[in-house]
């Protein structure tokens, strides 16, 4: 699965461009698209190209929106959930961490509100730790994703996919586990699947050229100061 996202202020921020990114991903063999925002998924105006108009793939929909005083920003309230649903996304991805959502709502209560209003929708929990993954399944989430590993102040800050988390959760939960986060190479994607992930989501490494370029530049600069045999050297620079 490929995440096609570009935030405001980034060079590729455009529903038209994200739709073309999604089409390229579909041609390349992607089986689903993760997309951010109503406009990117379906477009506000009929004459604007958007992901749902360009590809025939299921969409994992999110809306990234920050609320002052609260940590969660991935589909953090019912307002964003309603936007995702109205856009036609087949899967709703939300912050599934222990962090309290805007309005003082817990993840468990938030999921109940979603399921009460949209009982037919598949809801995915973006989590950051093993404990959160276990709790997400107990709450009733349909899917669990490792999206936020490394993005909470209590999860490990790694230079590679959180293989340990993937392996532990894959063995412990019965719902499908989606591996996402810091997957930069096909080899890492395969490793995540071998660790037990049901599927993988790759984003930055495919659809964010400014970050891909930045990684190349950092690795080149880092290598200039290394003395080891180049054939054995690996770049550990973060994206």
Image (spheres, rainbow, N blue to C red):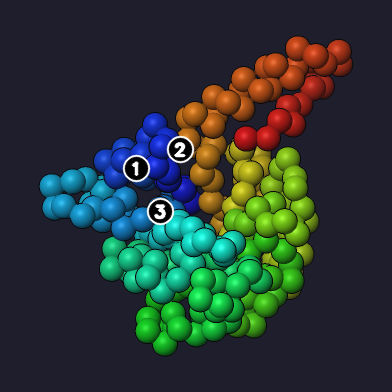
Task: Label 3, secondary structure: give it.
Answer: strand
The quarter of the picture where the C terminus appears is top right
Q: Is residue 21 visible?
A: no
Residue 178: x and y in percent read 58, 60
Observer-side mark, 3 or 2, equals 3
The residue drawn where x is 59% and y is 69% is 96
Residue to which mark 2 is pinned: 207
Judge the density around disc 3: few (<14), some (14-19), many (≥20) Cα neighbours within 10 Å: many
Q: Are marks 2 and 1 in contact (CB under 8 Å)?
A: yes
Q: How many numbered marks have been drawn onto this rendered protein structure? A: 3
Say which quarter of the image contains residue 146. bottom right
Q: Which residue is label 1 attached to?
A: 18
Residue at the image position 71 percent from the left and 30 percent from the top: 237
Which labelled disc corresponds to residue 36? 3
Which comes sooner in the sequence, label 3 or label 2? Answer: 3
Judged from the image, the secondary structure of the residue bearing numbered disc 1 is helix
Q: Where is residue 185 shown, x and y percent of the image?
A: 62, 37
Residue visible at 69% across and 52% down?
150
Is residue 15 or residue 233 the one in the foreground?
15
Is residue 137 shown above or below 66?
A: below
The part of the image, by quadrant, that contains residue 20 is top left
Give the side of residue 51 with respect to residue 44, left or right. Answer: right
Callouts 3 and 2 close, C-beta under 8 Å: no
Element type where label 2 sits in the image: helix
């Amino acid at each position: 699965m490929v995440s096609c996202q570009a935030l405001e202020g980034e060079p590729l921020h455009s529903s038209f461009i994200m739709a073309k990114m999604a089409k390229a991903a579909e041609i390349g063999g992607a089986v689903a698209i993760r997309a951010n925002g109503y406009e990117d998924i379906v477009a506000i105006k009929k004459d604007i190209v958007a992901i749902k108009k360009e590809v025939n793939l299921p969409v994992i929909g999110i809306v990234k929106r920050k609320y002052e005083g609260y940590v969660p920003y991935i589909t953090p309230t019912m307002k964003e959930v309603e936007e995702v649903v109205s856009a036609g996304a087949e899967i709703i991805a939300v912050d599934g961490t222990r962090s309290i959502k805007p309005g003082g709502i817990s993840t468990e209560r938030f999921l109940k509100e979603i399921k009460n209003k949209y009982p037919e929708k598949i809801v995915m929990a973006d989590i950051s730790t093993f404990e959160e993954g276990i709790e997400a399944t107990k709450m009733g989430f349909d899917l669990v994703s490792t999206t936020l590993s490394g993005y909470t102040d209590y999860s490990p800050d790694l230079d590679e996919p959180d293989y340990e988390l993937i392996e532990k959760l894959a063995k412990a939960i019965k719902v499908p586990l989606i591996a996402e986060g810091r997957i930069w190479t096909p080899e890492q994607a395969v490793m995540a699947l071998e660790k037990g992930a049901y599927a993988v989501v790759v984003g930055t490494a495919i659809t964010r050229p400014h970050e891909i370029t930045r990684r190349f530049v950092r690795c080149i600069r880092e290598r200039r100061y290394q003395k080891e045999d180049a054939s054995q050297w690996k770049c550990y620079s973060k994206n």
